[in-house]
């Protein structure tokens, strides 16, 4: 274990965890973890998937009862039984997925179980005023009577924070709040976090984005494999050291640039041409060539049309103009089924919703595309399924005890590998990856990027949409830059640098 | 100003009602008379009372199939208490309502604590209560008591030729009570929250189990009350009464604009939904040449329309969990 430095106090300790332990059958999810949160600080909680971040938060908020250790809030030991208890004590949590009620109005979401009552009946006027006041703290000016679901996810996230803060919270836990926000929204979230910090709140901030850690936090606590690595002052910790703490090993290969001449694919030349593919109000016509053994990056900001282009090529959305040609022959792409038959694959952006079938086993998930391609009348023999699944689990390093575990119980990185495996067994010609590394910890991240490169060497054409420029720069042979639902530029070879991409986006 | 999305289904319900009623007045002069209105309120009283309870169940994301059997069971139980034990009808009614609420609460406990599909539990409740009817009584029996004839004789005259009966007054009071519970109590708001997203509601500190138990107890209460009104209204009890009323009640709730998946809707909408179903029936009766099955066909078409409308509204919502509720 690395030496934990003892930073100078920024305020008095509000939340203190000592020797926390949580054991699930066969797994030590959390072991002997100490964690201190001061008043008026933003404290990053970092670690790879499975490091114990979520478990620690669940122990603090009472989702899981702890098996060892103590949690004290303002000097008193607490034993919350569910998040409601913790809330009442002053520990509020905002989860990654907005946990509010989309069908209720904004005001009601803010005031649920906290409405002012007169003679046992809700006094709506006062309740609405309280709701408005809660939003004013965040400088949010929206119609509180409209259903929450009619607002964007970003605003819903802010409403969740407003609710959390309005509870006289002493401790605010933000569990990956930035995952679905764009750059502007993240900026205003940070401003709000600093405001709350100035008011003396202790904030625990869980994220995968290291630049955000440096932008906003005061201290960092790193967990690894359920154990504490150490607590550090953000300013005194170099990013490279932080990554080392998180991974416990050097991570050099991630940033290695793959040049075109490094491609090892020598098989037959196959070509996929996208010609003027577009759809009204969704995407301006885009043309793009892809070759077997080539990785094409798709860069651009959130909402620039990256996902839309992926969906049009895969037939999830039907294009109203343009065609896709494979080796000069037009391909009919009226639905994903046609695309799969044609040898296309898509790893969607929203893994949980559109990618995995959580209740099905790893094996069944891996078989889906191949079976879909063969048609349901020709089932794949069980022995063959088993063999393929085992092969893939080994080849991609999927961390699962066996092939029958439901995919929903694996970590995000491993789920992504299962989806990759699904397409690999169906031997596609073109694989479209939409944000393949989103929500995946740094270690699995490197694995996935390594996999992408290997796939390419085996003769796949890859189209990878990503918002992380360093990632695109690291592996792409060519980069198509999207802006405002249009392809604005295409970079090749030595032109592919972060600066050039940013310039193309900004131009 | 833009109308709040939540009111769209209610607006649609009102539009349908206005259209049907307007058509009735246009085609048949007698339709505008308050006599028709009074008859609508009376004839549909027991259905609307049941449907108010059903509104809470559907808002919470559940379903209660036992209400039709409950109406019959309460009738048979009351007949037994009044004629067999010589009890005063009001006391018999109070006992019946307590039994009905308790039975609802029991189903709620099973649904909440054991996390079983409400469809299954209330289906079992439906068969159980219907069977219990026959255990008490095999035939149709009259409920003979001076109070019952007083109840059916009670009339408040309306301007015109119409009047309000005791059933109608009770129904209107029930609707008002339902509105207050739904919109002015924490319990009511928690029902909406649970129907909107149960998982989130739990994380927001809503007492999910207690609320679900109370929802089914409330549905038991309203359906038992409806059974009492039905028994007084018909002055008889019959083990095969009110077969399929659970489905009529669900239809009234949906036509009233409540989201079948829960979380959105209004008690007042259910009132209008019930009235719409009554108006359709009355229109077909007025016409005379149409088979009464046309009622079902029209209600079916309306249901389709409303379910599609609801789907369109919720589809525009972001952050709506797939299969929420």
Image: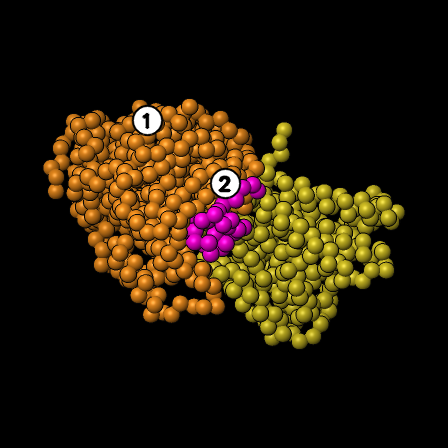
Chain colours: A orange, B yellow
Above or below for A257 versus A51: above
* Quadrant the N terminus of chain A occupies: top left
**Residues at marks 1 and 2, common chain?**
yes
Q: Is residue A94 left or right of residue B193?
A: left
Residue B227 visible (yes or no): no
**What is the span of residues highlighted in magenta in the rendered image?**
A320-348
Tell me what residue is drawn at x 25 percent, y 58 percent.
A394
Name the element at disc 1: helix
Q: Quadrant location of residue A407? A: bottom left
Q: In the image, residue A285 lies at what x, y percent? A: 52, 36
Residue situated in front as seen by the camera: A274 or B203: A274
Tell me what residue is drawn at x 45 percent, y 63 percent.
A374
Q: In the image, residue A377 lies at what x, y percent? A: 48, 68
Q: Is residue A363 left or right of residue A52?
A: right
Residue A357 visible (yes or no): yes
Give the residue pinned by disc 1. A499
Q: Is residue A126 left or right of residue A21?
A: right
Pointer 1 indicates a residue of which chain?
A: A
Give the residue pinned by disc 2. A275
Sequence order check, earlier mark of 1 and 2? 2
């Amino acid at each position: 274990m690395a030496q934990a430095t003892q930073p100078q106090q920024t305020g008095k300790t509000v939340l203190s965890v000592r020797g926390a332990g949580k054991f699930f059958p066969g797994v030590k999810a959390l072991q002997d973890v100490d964690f201190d949160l001061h008043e008026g600080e933003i404290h990053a909680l970092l670690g790879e998937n499975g490091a114990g971040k979520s478990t620690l938060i669940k122990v603090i908020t009472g989702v899981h009862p702890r098996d060892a250790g103590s949690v004290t809030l303002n000097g008193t030991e607490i034993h919350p039984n569910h998040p409601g208890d913790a809330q009442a004590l002053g520990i509020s949590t905002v989860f990654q997925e907005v946990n509010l009620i989309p069908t209720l109005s904004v005001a009601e979401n803010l005031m649920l179980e906290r409405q002012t009552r007169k003679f046992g009946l809700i006094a709506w006027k006062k309740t609405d005023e309280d709701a408005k006041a809660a939003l004013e703290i965040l400088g949010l000016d929206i119609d509180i009577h409209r259903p929450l679901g009619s607002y964007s996810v970003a605003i819903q996230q802010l409403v969740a924070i407003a609710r959390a803060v309005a509870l006289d919270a002493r401790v605010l836990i933000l569990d990956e709040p930035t995952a679905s926000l764009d750059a502007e929204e993240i900026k205003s979230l940070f401003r709000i976090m600093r405001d709350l910090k100035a008011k003396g709140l202790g904030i625990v901030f869980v994220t995968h984005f290291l630049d955000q850690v440096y932008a906003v936090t005061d201290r960092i606590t790193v967990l690894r494999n359920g154990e504490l690595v150490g607590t550090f002052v953000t300013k005194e910790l170099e990013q490279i050291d932080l990554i080392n703490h998180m991974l416990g090993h050097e991570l050099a290969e991630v940033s290695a640039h793959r040049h075109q001449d490094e491609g090892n694919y020598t098989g037959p030349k196959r070509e996929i041409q996208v010609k003027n593919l577009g759809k009204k109000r969704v995407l301006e016509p885009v043309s793009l060539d892809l070759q077997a053994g080539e990785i094409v990056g798709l860069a651009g900001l959130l909402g620039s049309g990256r996902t839309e282009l992926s969906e049009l090529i895969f037939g999830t959305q039907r294009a109203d103009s343009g065609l896709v040609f494979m080796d000069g022959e037009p391909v009919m792409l009226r639905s994903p089924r046609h695309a799969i038959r044609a040898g296309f694959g898509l790893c969607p952006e929203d893994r949980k919703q559109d990618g995995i079938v959580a209740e099905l086993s790893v094996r069944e998930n891996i078989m889906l595309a191949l079976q879909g391609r063969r048609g349901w009348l020709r089932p794949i023999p069980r022995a063959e399924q088993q063999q393929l699944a085992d092969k893939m689990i080994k080849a991609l390093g999927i961390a699962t005890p066996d092939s029958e575990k439901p995919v929903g119980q694996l970590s995000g990185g491993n789920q992504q590998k299962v989806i990759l495996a699904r397409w690999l067994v169906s031997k596609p010609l073109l694989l479209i990856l939409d944000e393949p590394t989103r929500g995946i910890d740094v270690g699995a991240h490197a694995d996935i990027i390594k996999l992408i490169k290997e796939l390419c060497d085996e003769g796949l054409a890859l189209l990878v949409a990503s918002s992380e420029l360093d990632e695109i720069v690291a592996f792409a042979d060519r980069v198509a830059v999207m802006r405002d639902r249009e392809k604005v530029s295409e970079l090749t070879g030595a032109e592919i640098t972060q600066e050039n991409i940013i310039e193309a986006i900004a131009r | 100003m833009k109308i709040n999305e939540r009111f769209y289904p209610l607006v649609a319900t009102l539009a349908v009602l206005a259209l049907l009623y307007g058509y009735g007045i246009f085609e048949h002069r007698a339709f505008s008379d308050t006599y028709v209105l009074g008859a609508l309120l009376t004839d549909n009283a027991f259905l609307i009372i049941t449907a108010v309870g059903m509104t809470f169940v559907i808002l919470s994301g559940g379903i209660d199939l036992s209400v039709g059997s409950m109406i019959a069971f309460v009738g048979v139980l009351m007949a037994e208490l009044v004629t067999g034990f010589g009890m005063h009808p009001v006391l018999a009614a109070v006992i019946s309502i307590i039994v009905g609420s308790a039975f609802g609460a029991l189903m709620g406990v099973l649904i909440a604590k054991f996390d079983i599909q409400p469809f299954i539990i209330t289906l079992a409740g439906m068969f159980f209560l219907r069977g219990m009817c026959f255990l008490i009584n095999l035939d149709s029996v009259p409920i003979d008591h001076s109070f019952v004839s007083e109840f059916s004789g009670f009339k408040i005259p309306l301007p015109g030729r119409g009047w309000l009966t005791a059933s109608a007054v009770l129904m209107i009071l029930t609707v008002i009570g339902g509105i207050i519970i739904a919109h002015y109590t924490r319990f009511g708001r928690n029902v909406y929250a649970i129907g909107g997203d149960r998982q989130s509601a739990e994380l927001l500190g809503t007492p999910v189990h207690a609320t679900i138990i109370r929802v089914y107890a409330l549905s038991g209460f309203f359906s038992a009350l409806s059974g009492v009104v039905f028994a007084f209204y018909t002055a008889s009890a019959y083990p095969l009464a009110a077969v399929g009323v659970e489905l009529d009640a669900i239809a009234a709730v949906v036509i009233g604009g409540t989201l079948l998946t829960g979380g959105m809707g209004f008690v007042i909408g259910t009132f209008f939904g019930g009235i719409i179903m009554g108006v359709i029936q009355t229109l077909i009766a007025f016409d005379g040449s149409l088979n009464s099955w046309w009622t079902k066909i029209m209600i079916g078409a309306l249901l389709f329309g409303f379910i599609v409308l609801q789907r369109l509204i919720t589809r525009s919502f972001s952050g709506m969990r797939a299969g929420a509720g």
